[in-house]
Image (tube, rainbow, N blue to C red):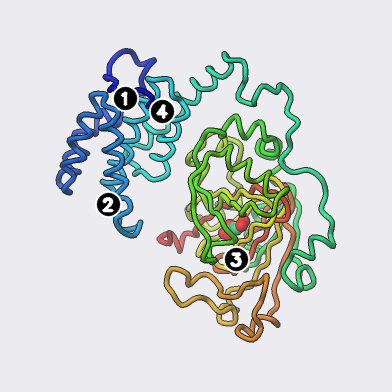
Amino acid sequence: MSSDTTTRRGGNSFDHLDTPTLDAESAGLLHAISEHGGYAFVGMAAQAAAGDFRAAEAAREMAWEQLHSGPWHSVLPVWRNAYSMACLRMADLHFAGGEFKEALRVLDMGLIMGGMLLRKDLDAAVEKVSTRARGDSRVSGSGCNGGSSKSESRLVDGELDKAEMLRVLPQKSLSCKIVVKRSALSLEGFLREYFLSGLPVLISDSMAHWPARTKWNDLDYLKTVAGDRTVPVEVGKNYLCPEWKQELITFSQFLERIQATGSSSVVPTTYLAQHPLFDQINELRNDICIPDYCFAGGGELRSLNAWFGPAGTVTPLHHDPHHNILAQVVGKKYVRLYPASLSEELYPYSETMLCNSSQVDLDNIDKEVYPKVCDLEFMDCILEEGEMLYIPPKWWHYVQSLTTSLSVSFWWSDSGNSTVS
Ligand SMILES: O=C(O)CCC(=O)C(=O)O
């Protein structure tokens, strides 16, 4: 907020964000917060509701502290909702002051870190602020795409050199069994031949109709729909390395890092990995379609995640409890798969948090320490743009992007396994 005086709430709805859920739930939420000892928060929230920006900031900081007071799973939902409330108050005041980027930043923080209670208000507020921000930049003549009327900026272009590709992949890559590729596989064929027998399959020609297939390779489009949005990214080689960390940056900054990674080896790898981006950015959600295969087994769709990053990102060998369709929208990835029956030979970590990850670094196998892994049979493939890979539950997978890559994973449970989350 640029002014250091307070801004009083009032005026017409053009200057303010509509928050019908907050208006209806605020009293109950504040009561619950005071029952959890949050008297100071309640005091600040009252001042924030009257238009005091500093109080809104202070309330948000108090809730932020509560979000970081222990492991994430033990944070009480009431504090996550308190955090969303404070974000909405701050965003409203930024919006009234014409500070649209700042408003979007706090709204995204509310979406990423806040609870579910005020989700609809946050979504509606994002829409209102984005629409106004885009209107403004059109008036100022720059346009959301920086003024260029014709998009020439493709995210991924050109072909890969096979020898170069094999040089960066783990040893023995593409020399064993290649995952079977099927074109436009029917749902019935998928069920009978792969889902029920628990076997991976590559499926081509079944996502040509996704708007994302044409739109996401266009930097201008991505900047226009998501440039000012804040997203969590992972920085460093991968999540098993000690120097690995998480950051919150804007999508535009993320795209700049992707572009810089190719031209400089000093830029650390930045990966927008396993993030429910499509719950956050509606325009991107509208660009993808849920594959029919995800309805196999009659279970529930568990999560849709984005995996966006430059060439060279590595997701180390691990397994997940769900069925997974990994859909490749832009660029290509190498994927290696080991069946669940080989778990013992893949040396899982013993700590609970990491017990679905292997201690073996496939990019640099220590044969003395992990002798059993070297002779294991695996399946692998290049997941090409426009293809989907079905990874059955518990299959170990290692993934390396070979170009800048945008993929989407769809995880679902079957009806007998609907309690797994
Ligand atoms: O694409 C990646 O880097 C990893 C994907 C993955 O592990 C998954 O979809 O479960």
SS of the residue under disc 4? helix
Among numbered discs 4 and 2, the one appearing first in the sequence: 2
Tell me the amino acid under the disc marked 1.
Answer: Asp
State left or right for residue 225 relative to residue 85.
right
Which image quarter: residue 116? top left
Task: Work out whether residue 210 or residue 328 is closer to the camera in this orientation and state it.
Answer: 328
Among numbered discs 2 and 1, the one appearing first in the sequence: 1
SS of the residue under disc 2? loop
Q: Residues within 10 Å of mark 3 (few under 14, many from 20)?
A: many
Contact (CB < 8 A) between labels 1 and 4?
no
Tell me the amino acid under the disc marked 3.
Answer: Pro
Contact (CB < 8 A) between labels 3 and 4?
no
Quarter of the image with the C terminus is bottom left
Among numbered discs 2 and 3, the one appearing first in the sequence: 2
Residue bearing the label numbered 3: 316
Mark yes or no: residue 123 visible: yes
Task: Work out whether residue 261 or residue 124 is closer to the camera in this orientation and state it.
Answer: 261
Q: Position of residue 259 (x, y in %)?
A: 68, 43
Quadrant in which ligand 1 is drawn: bottom right
Does any atom of ligand 1 lie closer than 8 Å to the CB of label 3?
A: no
Residue bearing the label numbered 4: 125
State which mark lies toward you, 1 or 3: 1
Residue bearing the label numbered 1: 4
Residue bearing the label numbered 2: 76
What separation in Å lies between label 2 and label 3 (alpha carbons)?
Answer: 32 Å
Tell me the amino acid under the disc marked 2.
Answer: Leu
What separation in Å lies between label 2 and label 1 (alpha carbons)?
Answer: 33 Å
SS of the residue under disc 1? loop
Q: Residue at x 30, y 42 (%)?
A: 61
Q: Residue at x 59, y 17 (%)?
A: 138
State left or right for residue 210 relative to residue 60.
right
